[in-house]
Amino acid sequence: MLIRRACEADIDRIAQLETICFDDSWSREMVAAELRGTNPSVCYLVVEGEEILGYAMIWFVPPEGEICNLAVHPDFRRRGLASLLMEAILCESAERGVDKLSLEVRESNAEAQALYSKFGFKIAGRRPEYYRDGEDAFVMRRYAEGGY
Ligand SMILES: CC(C)(COP(=O)(O)OP(=O)(O)OC[C@H]1O[C@@H](n2cnc3c(N)ncnc32)[C@H](O)[C@@H]1OP(=O)(O)O)[C@@H](O)C(=O)NCCC(=O)NCCS
């Protein structure tokens, strides 16, 4: 099992993982646009051989960054894979001079909120009806120096 950066050859398998992990998954075109486009996206994968077990998509716009998506295949959860992805994100954030990371997470998504809290993120706001089904999002933020 290892962490590596995604490339265009991974688009189909990332899109497949998206459909497994999310009801409102990103389409293949959306994944492809992130990896091919002009967006400042970086995508990390946890892989075992040819299998993609987890992935994270981040925008780095120093001094800020946004975690756009992060997911682990249901069969491989609670084994520390999301934590590996988070460590890779925090490491690259430090290297790029990104000291403020943000993300949106469903109000009902206690698992993901617990993950982000473990890595120093705190709830900083709420976006009403952020998701297509009308659910609110929490905005969570992490500052490198620990100040809020
Ligand atoms: C959230 C998610 C990425 C966690 O992945 P994971 O590989 O299982 O996470 P890890 O094993 O690295 O767990 C790290 C921490 O996250 C928290 N956590 C993860 N799963 C949890 C669960 N089911 N219940 C409570 N806390 C949980 C815990 O704090 C855990 O630390 P601990 O093991 O010391 O208790 C995974 O459940 C997932 O893909 N969910 C669906 C997609 C999703 O919601 N993504 C987030 C979008 S914002």
Image: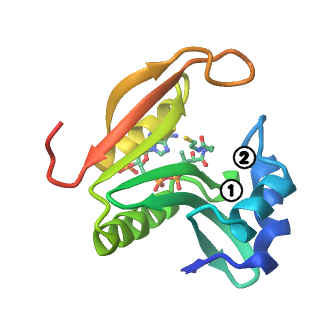
Q: Which mark is residue 21?
A: 2
* Image spot of residue 61 (x, y percent): 43, 59
Element at label 1: loop
Residue at 62% of width from left, 56% of height from top?
72
Q: Quadrant of the N terminus?
A: bottom right
Residue at 71% of width from left, 79% of height from top?
7
Q: Amino acid at mark 1?
A: His
Q: How many marks?
A: 2
Residue at 63% of width from left, 17% of height from top?
135
Asked if disc 1 is less than 8 Å from ligand 1, the answer is yes
Q: Which mark is residue 105?
A: none
Res. 44 image quadrant: bottom right
Residue at 68% of width from left, 15% of height from top?
134
Q: Which residue is mark 1?
A: 73
* Image spot of residue 23 (x, y percent): 78, 35
Q: Amino acid at mark 2?
A: Cys
Tell me if 48 is positioned left or right of 127 in this view.
right
* Image spot of residue 94 (x, y percent): 28, 69
- Residue 53 in the image: above or below residue 130: below
Q: Quadrant of the C terminus?
A: top left
Tell me if 33 is positioned left or right of 127 in this view.
right
